Amino acid sequence: MLILGIETATIQVGCAIGGHEGVLASFHAAKGRRHVETLVPAIEFMCKQAQIDLSEISVVAVDVGPGLFSGLRVGVSAAKALAQALRVPTIGISSLDLLAFPVRYTNRLIVPAIDARRGELFYAFYRQVPGGAQRLSPYQVGSPDDLASELLARGEDCLVVGDGALRYPHILTEVSGAEAGDGTSAFPSAASLVELAHAQALREQFCQPWELQPLYLRKSDAEINWTAAVDRAR
């Protein structure tokens, strides 16, 4: 079973291929937010270098968010189109789950935080369990101060990862005493996506391409700006 993973929830664009042998090939680029222009050539290049034909893919996995609205639409749309063309099922996994996975061996409370723009963060709380990281809270959106207050109230050793931790280090670490991850844990990884999707695929936890939906925790910037413009016009 070969799984193609597509990652576009943040400013990073990524893709990976893997299966029971682990991750066989991956590609990541995090400059310019050129998701549309980068994704398809990246998949083609990766397949060529790994000597894998797309017809060999058994499952298409995709990061469904939360994250950047335009990026999510690109990734989910591409995953749907590829899965329908290949006639294979899909698996959707949250960006916050993907950020927690690589640091799952820590004994600290794991807090992935994605920069949601407009002075907000997408975040959730996780704890190490055998074989992975278990989510302890709903996916949330709030200000860095909101998250820092929650961390302080928990009174635990915490590890905050993701580009949100890099953007607001003073608030999240100095106020709450949490430790912030570095650049290696800033973005969800397509390689982690393939690993998590493979475990779900073994349990046959699939969905059909038309069932895939991005995970939005708030309205898009366009909707927010339109609502504000309408309110000002009244």
Image (cartoon, grey):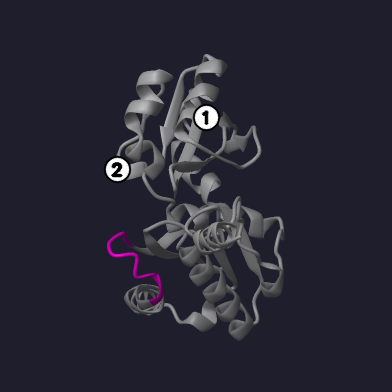
Quarter occupied by residue 133: top right
- Residue type at mark 2 is Gly
Up the image or down, 166 lies above or below 198; here it is above
Looking at marks 1 and 2 on the same chain, the residue that comes earlier in the sequence is marked by 1
Name the spot of residue 178 as percent of width and height, x first: 41, 22
User: In percent of the image, x 40 and y 73: which residue is there?
Assistant: 39
Q: What element carries label 1?
A: helix
Q: What element carries label 2?
A: helix
* Residue lying farthest to the top in this orientation: 155
Up the image or down, 229 lies above or below 132; here it is below
User: In percent of the image, x 59 and y 85: which residue is there?
Assistant: 85
Up the image or down, 120 lies above or below 27; here it is above
* Residue 9 appears in view: yes
Which stretch did the figure color magenta? 29-36
Q: Mark 2 points at which residue?
A: 183
User: In percent of the image, x 52 and y 75: which residue is there?
Assistant: 78
Name the spot of residue 208 as percent of width and height, x first: 71, 71
Report the quarter where the C terminus lies. bottom right
Q: How crowded is mark 1: few (under 14 residues within 10 Å), some or many (20 or more)?
A: some
Q: Name the residue under label 1.
A: 146
Name the spot of residue 225 as percent of width and height, x first: 51, 60
- Residue type at mark 1 is Asp
- Is residue 47 part of the magenta span, yes or no? no
Q: Which mark is residue 199?
A: none
Horizontal arrangement in the rendering, residue 115 relative to residue 28 (left or right): right
User: In percent of the image, x 53 and y 83: which residue is there?
Assistant: 55
* Residue 6 appears in view: no
- Is residue 32 part of the magenta span, yes or no? yes
